[in-house]
Image (spheres, coloured by chain):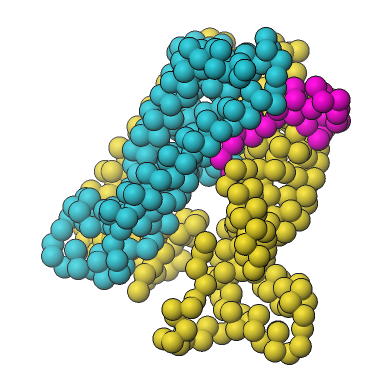
Chain colours: A cyan, B yellow
């Protein structure tokens, strides 16, 4: 008998934590990532430099190091939140850099004529960003953002290393009692594959719906 | 026509007053006196906001004594740096091992996924999809607890390297496949018509050009791989983050140690990322060496599809 089914309550609760982290961090990182991209095209030099530095920092630093820093070290400086929110915040700021890179490549696919036309019509910068550039850029990068979201769902597993009881931590705990590692971890792997598949299918659906045929 | 609105790196400082001032100069007209004043105010306000945030952070750190000189004094000791340096060597060792194994396996998988035989294609495709969608941490737990149970015990390096190779070979395979698909099919056809065998055409004509075209992506993936070796922390493999954690516990200095470790990762990976950006730019400048022939309409129906 599969020990995961014997401990169904614990597994479901842990799966809920994983999904909660993935959804909240996913939405948060998309919002933050788009804001960072907007900062990267702004006419204000300080914002452009800051956004560039932000992306470079989080793309070059391991998530696990950031999690350790936020969970174990920052309380020394009096900065402490409950465990799961801390992990979610770290995931948001980390994955936002990847979302920003994806959106950037989308902004680069917007034809120059679109911008010239919006300027010729007298739209302000904020208007042409909001009404012309971002809608087209985001439609072009649905699939890449879907890939970032899949990576994010996989990365929620790292929260297990700092003590968040999500799916990986829960099955590890069950394994310590049941000692059937191959069966248990493979089953958990199948659950993660299901999550990734769902994100991939959703991204495909959204893309078919919003894609612009040029 | 499209333009690179946001460059990979910020544009270099203005060389002449005639040069376009903004990297994304398509978005706005050359600013007049009013716009210049608004931009100046915007710059000042954002700089002020950044300064306040940094100051608040520093104040928070200082009020908890995290900025005291004695907290940072150990990091003037060469022995501490030597200790961390050994960890960095471990990180580089694991990265090198996984990069070599993962790239070799990735090439095999990439061509497997484009094979003429259905079962090889399905097998490679299935492996790639599974390996990309299972967390590496889960595979590491499987190695840690599963293998000893069936009587296999591997050295610590391999407990880290095998799961990372499984995950990264799938990514390398997809990058190399993208490179192969980006080549005009005439390259392979020409090689075959010159009398090369299929393996020769792949080895001598297709692969070198494909790898050349995707070198920036490969280097970017190398950065991601080096970040992932920080999972060695879980299996107690001597790498940078693990050494950092031991040092933090030993010195009872969590914040300074983790900040220093993060900084080391930033420097090493940042140089690799800069290399990737440089390669990308060179590729943009020189372009592909292969002339792009217009595709015949009759052929477009039979063009290769990404499966």
Q: Is residue B49 visible?
A: yes
* Secondary structure character of the magenta stretch overall: helix
Magenta span contains residue A29: no
Residue B113 appears at what percent x and percent y?
Answer: 63, 60
Task: Name which residue lies at 63% across and 30% down.
Answer: A186
Choose top left, top right, bottom left or bottom right for residue B108.
bottom right
Residue B150 appears at what percent x and percent y?
Answer: 82, 25
Residue A192 appears at what percent x and percent y?
Answer: 53, 33
Judge from the rendering whether residue B139 lies leftward or rightward of residue B286; answer left or right. Answer: right
Quadrant of the drawing holding the N terminus of chain B: bottom left
> Which residue lies most toward the bottom here?
B194
Residue A182 versus residue A171: which sits nearer the camera? A182
Q: Is residue B176 visible?
A: no
Residue B78 appears at what percent x and percent y?
Answer: 82, 27
Choose top left, top right, bottom left or bottom right for residue B246.
top right
Task: Name which residue lies at 47% across and 18% down.
Answer: A12
Task: Name which residue lies at 37% across and 39% down.
Answer: A30
> Which residue lies most toward the left here?
A121
Residue segment shown in magenta: B132-159
Magenta span contains residue B133: yes
Q: In the image, is residue A198 above or below residue B304?
A: above
Choose top left, top right, bottom left or bottom right for residue B153.
top right
């Amino acid at each position: 008998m599969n020990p995961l089914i014997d401990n169904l309550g614990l597994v479901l609760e842990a799966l809920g934590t994983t999904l909660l982290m993935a959804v909240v961090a996913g939405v948060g990182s998309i919002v933050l990532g788009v804001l960072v991209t907007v900062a990267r095209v702004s006419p204000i030099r300080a914002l452009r430099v800051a956004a560039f530095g932000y992306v470079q920092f989080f793309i070059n630093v391991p998530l696990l190091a950031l999690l350790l820093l936020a969970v174990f070290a920052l309380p020394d400086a009096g900065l402490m939140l409950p465990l799961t929110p801390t992990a979610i915040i770290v995931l948001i700021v980390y994955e936002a850099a990847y979302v920003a890179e994806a959106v950037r490549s989308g902004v680069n696919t917007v034809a120059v004529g679109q911008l010239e036309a919006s300027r010729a019509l007298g739209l302000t910068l904020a208007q042409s960003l909001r009404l012309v550039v971002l809608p087209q850029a985001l439609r072009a990068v649905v699939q890449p953002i879907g890939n970032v979201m899949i990576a994010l769902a996989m990365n929620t597993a790292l929260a297990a290393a700092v003590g968040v009881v999500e799916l990986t931590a829960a099955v590890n705990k069950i394994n310590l009692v049941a000692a059937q590692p191959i069966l248990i971890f493979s089953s958990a792997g199948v659950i993660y594959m299901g999550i990734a598949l769902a994100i991939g299918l959703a991204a495909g659906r959204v893309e078919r719906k919003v894609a612009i045929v040029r | 026509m499209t333009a690179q609105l946001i460059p990979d790196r910020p544009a270099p400082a203005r060389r002449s007053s005639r040069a376009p001032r903004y990297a994304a100069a398509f978005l706005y007209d050359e600013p007049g006196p009013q716009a210049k004043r608004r931009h100046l105010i915007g710059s000042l306000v954002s700089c002020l906001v950044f300064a306040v945030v940094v100051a608040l952070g520093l104040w928070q750190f200082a009020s908890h004594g995290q900025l005291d000189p004695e907290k940072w004094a150990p990091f003037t000791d060469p022995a501490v740096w030597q200790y961390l340096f050994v960890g960095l060597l471990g990180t580089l060792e694991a990265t090198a091992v996984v990069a070599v194994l993962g790239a070799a396996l990735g090439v095999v998988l990439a061509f497997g996924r484009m094979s003429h035989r259905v079962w090889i294609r399905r097998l490679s495709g299935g492996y790639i999809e599974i390996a990309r969608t299972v967390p590496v941490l889960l595979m590491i737990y499987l190695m840690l607890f599963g293998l000893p149970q069936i009587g296999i015990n591997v050295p610590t390096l391999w407990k880290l390297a095998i799961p990372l190779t499984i995950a990264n070979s799938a990514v390398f395979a997809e990058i190399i496949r993208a490179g192969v698909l980006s080549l005009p099919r005439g390259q392979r056809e020409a090689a075959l018509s010159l009398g090369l065998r299929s393996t020769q055409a792949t080895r001598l004509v297709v692969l070198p050009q494909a790898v050349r075209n995707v070198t920036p992506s490969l280097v970017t993936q190398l950065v991601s791989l080096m970040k992932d070796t920080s999972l060695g922390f879980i299996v107690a493999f001597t790498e940078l983050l693990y050494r950092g954690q031991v040092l933090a516990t030993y010195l009872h200095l969590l914040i300074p140690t983790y900040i220093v470790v993060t900084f080391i990762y930033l420097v090493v990976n940042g140089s690799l990322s800069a290399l990737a950006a440089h390669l990308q730019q060179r590729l943009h400048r020189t372009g592909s060496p292969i002339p792009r022939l217009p595709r015949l309409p009759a052929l477009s129906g039979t063009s290769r599809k990404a499966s």
